[in-house]
């Protein structure tokens, strides 16, 4: 296999290059990252970045596997459980395959003597001593069980997706067949083990095995793996923003309109949907995630357009109606960029490069939401922070928006 860093690239964003993920070719493969992700040049760091990318796919209920869209049925259920794949492989490298351990009794061998059973085993008495015909010894044996075979099966599934990151990790062929005809039996078997164990490591192991088994219904193990990823990173970007910055239920902030047709009941039309709502102290931030290329190519055509600006102002008006006691209400678009390579001379994880104002009559308000800030997020920072479960960056964003708002209020902008 070639140097893995040379197999990585960023999506160009062209219509035929929206896919983000892994594509396998005859003797190699390519890893396609989203806009703005600064791909490391060192192999170990690059592998960590690939792991972060794959873990971010858990935010999408749809994946593109072997040129087909595969959707999860249940909310919060991963189509491909990459977190479980990584955990199982890491645990295997540290602890090996799961083996059942149980005690047996053996005669006349080395080990800890079981005196109770030895004494009960017809001792021979003499005048000055007691002789035992057989010494019973406790032995701890390891036995390959059905759990071992299930563990190995799930490891092979994990390596079928992630083996390119662990080229020296090999397992024997499966000695058990798990498919849709017997899947429920094995899930029930693992459930029984989960309920019976008191060991933390075993509980984690069985839980990750179950996740792999549950997701077998979404994948065809008999098909050669051609590609897996997402058709577009837009939904993932929106959910990354929500994960990092959303802490209010945005559904409450969905404005809508009603139709009143003569002699009929009121008809409620569809909602407008803000992506994320952040509250810090008594300040509200309405955030719209835009997986746009402006932070990458500095092309004005890739800025959010007037219809998006109008929506943000509408969201602000509706938020003011719902939350009239807020100290301040702010608005912002959040777009990807690369802090290492950009034309804005910026090198921060989160930075503000400008703002939008409308030319039409603005609402009469004491709040700042008619000004919509353009916020750039370093893609690598945001994706890696999700993989590391970093939830402490809300205040960074809020402080930057507040400072930017104070700056423009102290200057004259036309």
Image (cartoon, rainbow, N blue to C red):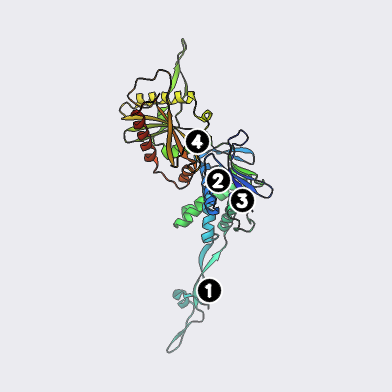
Q: Is residue 127 above or below residue 44?
A: below
Gap between marks 2 and 4, in whole Å? 39 Å
Where is 168 relative to 26, above or below?
below
- Horizontal side of 371 relative to 53 (left or right) equals left
> For the view shown, which residue lies furthest in the right direction?
26
Q: Is residue 188 visible?
A: no
Q: Which mark is residue 106?
A: 1
Q: Earlier in the sequence, mark 1 or mark 4?
A: 1
On the image, which quarter does residue 64 sit in? top right
Q: Give the x, y percent position of residue 394.
A: 39, 40
Numbered circle sitting on residue 160 = 3
Nearest the viewer among 178 and 17 is 17
Residue at label 4?
295
Mark found first going from the N terminus, 1 or 3: 1
For the residue pair 371 and 214, the one nearer the viewer reads as 371
Q: Return the disc, 3 or 2, that comes first in the chain's sequence.
A: 3
Q: Secondary structure at mark 3?
A: helix
Residue 86 in view, yes or no? yes
Q: Label 1 vs label 2: CA separation?
A: 41 Å
Q: Which residue is denoted by mark 2 in the rendering?
A: 214
10 Å neighbourhood of mark 3: few (<14), some, or many (≥20)?
some
User: For this rendering, which residue is in front, 156 or 366?
Assistant: 366
Marks 3/4: CA distance? Answer: 36 Å
Query: Which residue is depicted at the point 31% across and 30% down?
Result: 327
Tell which tag, 1 or 2, sits nearer the viewer.
2
Distance CA(mark 3)–CA(mark 2): 17 Å
């Amino acid at each position: 296999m070639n140097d893995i860093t040379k197999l990585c690239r960023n999506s160009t964003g062209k219509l035929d290059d929206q896919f983000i993920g892994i594509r396998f070719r005859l003797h190699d493969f390519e890893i396609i990252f989203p806009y703005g992700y600064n791909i490391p040049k060192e192999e170990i760091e690059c592998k960590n970045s690939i792991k972060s990318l794959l873990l971010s796919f858990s935010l999408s209920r749809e994946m593109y596997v072997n040129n087909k869209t595969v959707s999860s049925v249940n909310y919060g259920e991963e189509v491909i459980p990459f977190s479980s794949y990584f955990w199982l492989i890491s645990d295997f490298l540290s602890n090996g395959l799961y083996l059942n351990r149980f005690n047996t009794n053996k005669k006349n061998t080395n080990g800890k003597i079981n005196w109770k059973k030895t004494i009960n085993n017809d001792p021979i008495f003499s005048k000055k001593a007691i002789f035992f015909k057989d010494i019973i010894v406790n032995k701890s044996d390891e036995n390959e069980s059905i759990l071992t075979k299930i563990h190995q099966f799930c490891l092979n599934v994990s390596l079928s997706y992630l083996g390119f990151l662990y080229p020296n990790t090999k397992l024997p062929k499966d000695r058990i067949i798990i498919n849709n005809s017997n899947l429920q039996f094995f899930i029930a078997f693992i459930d029984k083990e989960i309920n019976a164990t008191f060991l933390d490591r075993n509980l984690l192991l069985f839980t990750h095995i179950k996740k792999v088994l549950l997701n077998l219904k979404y994948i065809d193990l008999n098909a050669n793996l051609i590609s897996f990823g997402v058709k577009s990173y837009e939904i993932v970007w929106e959910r990354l923003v929500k994960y990092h910055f959303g802490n209010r239920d945005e559904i409450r902030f969905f404005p809508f309109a009603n139709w009143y047709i003569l002699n009929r009941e009121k008809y409620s039309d569809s909602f407008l949907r803000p992506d994320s709502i952040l509250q810090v102290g008594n300040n509200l931030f309405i955030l719209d995630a835009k997986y746009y290329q402006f932070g990458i190519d500095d092309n004005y055509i890739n800025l959010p357009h007037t219809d998006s600006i109008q929506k943000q102002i509408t969201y602000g008006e509706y938020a003011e109606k719902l939350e009239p006691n807020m100290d301040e209400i702010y608005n912002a678009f959040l777009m990807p960029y690369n802090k290492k390579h950009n034309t804005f001379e910026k090198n921060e994880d989160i930075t503000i490069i400008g703002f939008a104002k409308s030319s039409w009559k603005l609402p009469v308000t004491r709040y700042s939401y008619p000004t919509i800030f353009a916020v750039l997020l370093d893609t690598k920072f945001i994706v890696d922070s999700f993989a590391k479960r970093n939830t402490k960056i809300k205040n960074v964003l809020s402080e930057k928006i507040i400072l930017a708002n104070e700056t423009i209020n102290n200057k004259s902008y036309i």
